[in-house]
Amino acid sequence: MSGTITETIPEPETTGSAHRAAGRGRSIATSLLPLAGIAILALLLLVVAPAVLTQFRLNNLGKYCCYAIAAVGIGIAWGRGGMLVLGQGLFFGLGAYAMGMHLKLEAAGPDAVPDFMLNFGSGVLPAWWEPFRSGAFTLVAIVVVPAVVAGVLGLAVFKRRIKGAYFAILSQALTVAFAALLVSQIKYTGGQTGLNSLTSFFGYNLYDPVNKQMIYFITAGLLLLMLLVTFQLYRSRFGELLLAARDGEERVRFLGHDPANIKVVAFVIAAVMASIGGAMFVPLAGLINPREVNALASIMLIAGVALGGRASLLGPALGALAVGFGRTYLSESFPDQWTYFLGGLFIIVILLIPFGLASVFPRLWRSIDRRRGVAA
Amino acid sequence: MTVHIASPDERGLDYLEIRGLTVDFDGFRAIDGVDLTLLQGQVHFLIGPNGAGKTTLVDAVTGLVRGTGHVGYRGQDLLSMRSHRIVRAGVGRTFQTATVFEELSVLQNLDIAGGVHRSAWGMFRSRRGVPTYVAEALETIGLAGLRDRPAGVLAHGQKQWLEIGMLLVQDAKVMLLDEPVAGMSAEEREETGELLRRIGAERTVVVIEHDMEFVRSYADLVTVMHAGKVLAEGTVAEIQADPKVQEVYLGRIAEGAEHA
């Protein structure tokens, strides 16, 4: 590239415009590739999986979808925003416990008190539990509570320009504290055992296979919806700005934006997604306890995102699904050694495909495209 | 030192006024009581040997380092504002090393700079077509043919033009350019100089530069800095005739020429 201005002015009009039109056509095809991916995933989750999987496996797949919903959010915050969110278990847990409280109250029946409160507490429902009798309040809380927590936390952290490892450690520490709090406050949270013996989901019996399948469909649908939201986000000007803030935070200031605000928005979106994933996890698993939301659970989430490819649209979701499958399959087949296998898999993927599994598809597409271009 | 034009307000001109600007790095005065008036419609060069405080001056004006004194622009004191607010007030800058977003296309780089004109909700919509101010900037900087290329593949000079284009899209009324032609070929320098002249008429353009040839060709007004202070100010001819400048500056130029 020699690069004087005169040399960069496009060629004579006819060839120039034809060339540009071809270039634009290709870029549209490439930019719609993620939509095709979402469509294929929709087909697999909504048509193929229910047809071929047993009730038990389908329910498991639903749980992986919950991790995948949280993972999509991590992709936004970490992949696009450069914030290593090591503690998404906190937000997964906020959503899960909000849902768990509602279902626990449903199981107890109107005006009754959850069983563990009779055993460990005063036998009186605490005032802050009371609103969770309302399903509508619970649904609002699942979105609003993590958004407020992440918003306040994000402003406090990013306005002070805390980033990198410091942010990662902070987010991880908060999750550790959150899990410890859940364990210690047994009379409010059920402690180590958490909230279990759930019987119904907004009035639908949790033991009825038809209802279980419905809950699976809702979860899979939510995952697809989150992917579509993220697709639009990445296409939007905000998506471009987020990428810019990741790659040149100081530079973004000189575009007239405070990068802290950009990061807070991405962090809040990630938190809400994690919370929605956590909320749907509860009716699928039939319980929630601190082990599902602790530091290890948070790391498993981020590991899935790294495996799938954090900066791509589908990578985080695919990675989370793969890790979910891998954990179940390996732990069933090799009860003693499965963690080593999983660890080995991570090392291999990171060595061979540093941008994650999802990066294979666009690369394949581009090479096909290029070959076609040469042929034409 | 007298200020050349006493009251730009009366002539309806835009200007940036620096009074008693001091930047202190733990006792070391990088900028020591600088008075400077930067006026619309002329390409104003800031020259001086390495360590004279040219870049630090720009850093202080744009909120990157803390300074004391007064930097007035349209009734606001820039020293009390944060960087992104200063940009929104209409004062933009570039950096010595071009800092475009390499993964974004030329078009996206320019478009992203237009965020100052958009509402918060508009940010969540995707771009449809090319806004007119982006198209105009693309033409002005001569990169229309490369608009869909990732900025990372641009040549060094083209990146600097892209940065200037981003300032145009931002609608920066004051442009502070830190060594925009460093590392450019003679041809590219000429193109850049013409570009600065074109955009300088309606704006306040300030250029930090080392290359005397370039300064001679395109400067309307030159300010020479030395050791954090303003040493001299005037046209190129006046500056070159100034014995003080010759003493501290021209000696260094000869030194610099050996390195080149």
Image (tube, helix red, strand yellow):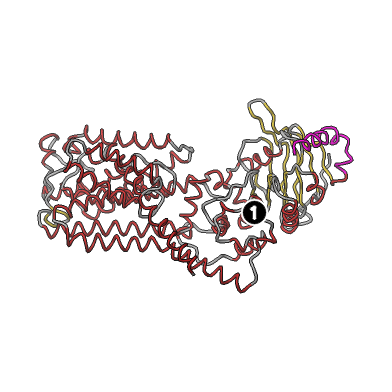
Residue B25 can be seen in this image: yes
Quarter holding the C terminus of chain B?
top right
x, y percentage for residue A87?
33, 39
x, y percentage for residue A197?
11, 45
Picture quarter containing residue A287? top left
**For this view, does B41 lie left or right of residue A240?**
right
**For this view, does A181 lie left or right of residue B165?**
left
Which residue is depicted at the point 23% across and 36% down?
A: A182
Q: Tell me the crowding category of disc 1: few under 14, some 14 to 19, or many 20 or more residues within 10 angstroms, Cα based.
A: many
On what subunit does the disc labeled 1 rest?
Answer: B
Residue range highlighted in magenta:
B238-260
Is residue B57 on the magenta stretch? Answer: no
Q: Which residue position is annotated with label 1?
A: B158
Which residue is depicted at the point 33% across and 61% down?
A: A38
Residue sticking out furthest to the front: A375
Is residue B255 on the magenta stretch? Answer: yes
**For this view, does A320 lie left or right of residue B211?**
left
Residue A289 or residue A104, whichever sits in front: A289
Type of amino acid under label 1: Gln
- Main structural element of the magenta stretch: helix, strand or loop? helix
